[in-house]
Amino acid sequence: MGILDNRYEKMSTPNGLRYGIIEVTTKCQCACPGCYMVRRNALNHGEMSFEQAVRVLDLCRDYCERELETMDLLGGDPLLWPHLQKYIEELIRRGILPWIFTNMLAITPELAQWLFERKVHVTGKLNINPDDPKQILLQAKMIGCNKKTASRMIAAIDIFRQAGYKAPLLRLQNLVRRYNIALIPEYYRWCLKHNLGTDLELMGSGEEIGEKYWQIAPTLEQIASMIKAVQRVRQEF
């Protein structure tokens, strides 16, 4: 289901770094409740230069005495980073697998095709069952935007699929919160029906966990019920 990424299981030596994560830009069109960058008021406050991002690769290579195996590109939204394609070409040249984590709003058919031709892994965002039009307002709430923006995000999934994307190259990440936890089984069933990978993510926190966190995050009992429901859906497939 993608809840645990087994890339991170074996770290045998102090310099056994194999996988990188880099935040290339703070630009983003969304203001998702529960996002640590929203809590810190860090969105839309700058981005890396191409040279800075390459320097990260060089430092990792010097430390490990070899290139990384993968590099996760985060933001903000990395599709808004002006050096994205140039950097992906640099990663591929070094034999490093690029993996983009995106809200998908800035995707175009041309860029989706370009990424697919290079077998770039993409993890998008989705919190609802797109087949139920009544849920689009909830999707807007989950990304801190209006209905029009939420509809664009849903349409972006089709842009990726029309370019040839499907599991395992395309996954959809669902940040589980109180608002949408009851819809997780529907979401999971929709992804499986459409041959898309899934990630269910529980809310983390870079700060002290207080009352505001628990106003958004689900309870332990809700999580336990969700897991049982997801297991039942999994058995269907």
Image (tube, grey):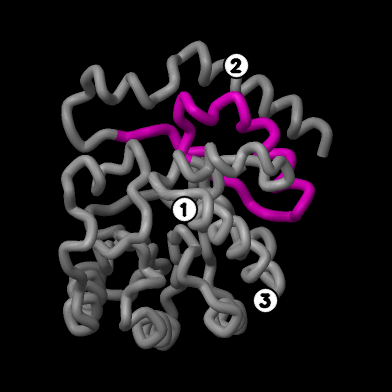
User: Which of marks 3 and 2 precedes in the sequence?
Assistant: 3
Determine whether, in the image, residue 48 is placed left or right of residue 76: left
Q: Which mark is residue 7?
A: 1
- Horizontal and vertical percent position of residue 101: 44, 60
Residue named by callout 3 = 163
Question: What residue span does the magenta drawing correspond to?
Answer: 175-204
Residue nearer the viewer, 73 or 25: 25
Horizontal relation, residue 95 to residue 170: left or right:
left
Q: Residue at x 69, y 67 (%)?
A: 161
Q: Residue 90 falls in which quadrant of the image?
A: bottom left
Residue 149 inside the magenta-drawn segment: no
Give the crowd class for mark 1: few <14, some 14-19, many >=20 residues within 10 Å.
few
Question: Quick one: SS at disc 1?
Answer: helix
**217 above or below 73?**
above
Identity of the residue drawn at 36% across and 87% down: 86
| Mark 3 element type | loop
Residue that label 2 marks: 225
Q: Position of residue 133 (x, y in %)?
A: 68, 43
